[in-house]
Every structure is written in C-alpha cells, then in structure tokens.
Amino acid sequence: MAKHTMRSGSRYQYLFGPVPSRRLGRSLGVDLTPRKTCTLDCIYCQLGRTTALTTERREYVPVADVVAEFADWLQSGGTADYITLAGSGEPTLHSRFGEVIERIRERTRIPVALLTNGTLLNRPDVLEAAAKADVVKVTLSAADETLFSRIHRPCRGVTLAQTVRGQVRLRDGFDGQIWLEVFLVWGVNSTPADVRRIAALARQVRPDRVQFNTSVRPPAEAFAEPVPGGVLAELAALFDPPAEVLAEFSAERSEQVGVTEETILAMLRRRPCTAGQVARVFGLHANEASKYLGKLLRTRRIRSERRADAVYYAGAGPGTRSGR
Ligand code: SF4
C-alpha cells in the first residue's frame, strides 16, 4: 500500500499526521475538541494555557464528519501504527468519543489509543467509552491535592482523589493496556520523596507501563523546567514496573511535506512567532509545531520570550544564550 502523507489543516479538519510519536510509533491523530478545551491547565502543557477550562461534555465536533474523514483517509491508503484520540484538548470531554472509537474499529484493525488526563474516568459513561480503546494513556503526576492544583490548575470540582478513583476503576474492568504517564517538572514534583508518593498511588492503578515525561517541548509556563535525563533515569526505579524514560523523537522524522527545522528557523530568524503562528504558517498541528520548537530550543538555535499573554520564539544569534 502506498505510504500516505498529508498536510494537516488542508485536506482534513479533524485528523493530523501520521506523526512520529514517542509512545506509539506512527500515529494518526484524531482531534475531538477545539484548541485548549480541557479539564486542566497544566503548567507544562505544550499547547499553551487552557482557554476553555471546563468539565462540560458535549459533541464539540460532529462525529459524522470525523468518521467521514477517517473513511477517506483509509480509502486513500492511509497506514499507521495507532489511531490516537488526542490533539488540542481533553478527548473525553467529547460526549460521543466512545462512538468515534467504535466507528474506527468497525473500519480498521489498527489499534486505537486514547490519550487522556484521566480526570473524568470517575464518570461511568466516560469509563465505559474509554474501555473501547486498545490502549488508554492516563496521567498521574501529583501525590496530594496541593501539588495536583499547583501542577494542573484544574477546573473547579476536579480533584486528584476522583482522578485516581477513576483510573483504578478503569483497571478493574479493562482488559486493554493502561499506560500511566508521570510528568515531572524540575523543582515542582521531582524530588525522590515526591516521586515515591506518586509511585505509591500508581501501584493502586496497576498500569501495564509507566512512562516518564518532562518538558522537552515548550511549556505553557517558562518555570516548568525539564528534569535532566540522568535524574529521570534514577527516579525510574521507584516504580513497579520501572518507569520508561521516553526519548524524544527527532522532529526531522516528521512526514510533513516541505517542513524542516531549517525552514522554521529561517522564519523565526526574520520574525518572532508564537507556536500557533508557526503551526498556521506551515500547516502543522499544534503538537507537531511544538515538537520542532522543542528541538530548536534544546539545541539553542532559538530562544523563547513571554510577552503579554503569549510566548514568542525567535532565532538565537551566534553566541546568544537561549532564553530557556
Ligand atoms: S497537558 Fe493535556 S491535560 Fe494538561 S492542559 Fe494540556 S491538554 Fe490538558
């Protein structure tokens, strides 16, 4: 079958990629919410600050249109390792996401992954829908309500206790894989004592895999600094099974046509832009734009700067120190 490539934002409105994913190989993204519609406003979010902080579940995008796009993608020879419900916000806020999974599964044997923060899994309808996926990736990055509020800045009524309860209930009735992401932020939840307490909660969830993540891509808040790789490797042993430290995929492996780190860098040297502007100019999904910017920041070819309410990225001249 011919390898299928596309430019996000042109051919499809709700599908993006396939993009290289650190967890999932080549992943076709299915975006079920408007940008930054989420139950949380995580300080490390690679999509910036949450603009619609909510627990309201509704059909944010029409299921029929999503399914029609997916059918078209399959028909034109689309292949991927996973079909992934993820993207611009929290997919379980979509009131019919379970039906989207069903419609996808009727049409393909490619496994379906749900990337969720897990905060709504305490609801029976969300739990039942989530269990239709092959893999559910949940997040658990705090061991008490104070830290949960500090890291995730949740919507009113969303608590760590309900989040853990929902994740445990999912495990109790689900044969598929649960991958538990622990997002560590330097100086916020990264001491061995913090991580030991998170590991104790994780044992209640009994995930198949535990995966460490840190701010390798530009975070919503500049103070959400990444935890060094060596420290992550030491902390990994505190989990059972031991946590995997996800290696960053190279953005150069993206299948986007005509977009490279160099073309993005060339533009940022001329004109500072926000991540959203980079995405729009190059026809990338926000996640993909963020991968490129993360790589350019880590290699100090660009720097970031917060102005008013937005983070701008600009080329870092020779000898100029990165802003991060
Ligand atoms: S990281 Fe995920 S859960 Fe947190 S604000 Fe961003 S989209 Fe929401």
Image (cartoon, rainbow, N blue to C red):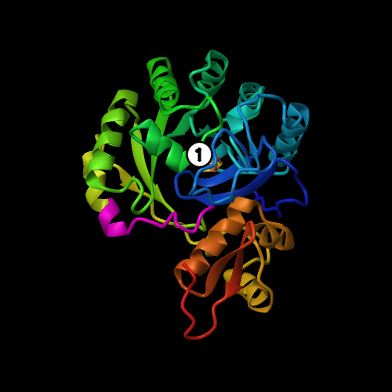
Q: Is residue 143 above or below residue 1?
A: above
Asked if residue 177 can be seen in this view, the reply is: yes
Magenta-highlighted residues: 220-232
What residue do we see at 60% from left, 73% from top?
314
Neighbor class of circle 1 (other Cα within 10 Å; few <14, some 14-19, many 20+) is: some
Q: Position of residue 13 (x, y in %)?
A: 75, 43
Q: Is residue 68 magenta?
A: no
Assign a secondary structure to mark 1.
loop
In the image, taking residue 81 as reference, residue 232 lies left or right, namely: left
Ligand 1 shown in quarter: top right
Q: Is residue 221 magenta?
A: yes
In this view of the protein, which residue sits in the foreground, 244 or 305? 305
Residue marked by disc 1:
153
For badge 1, the amino acid type reads Arg
In the image, taking residue 87 as reference, residue 241 lies left or right, namely: left
Q: Position of residue 62 (x, y in %)?
A: 76, 29
Q: Residue furthest bottom?
A: 318
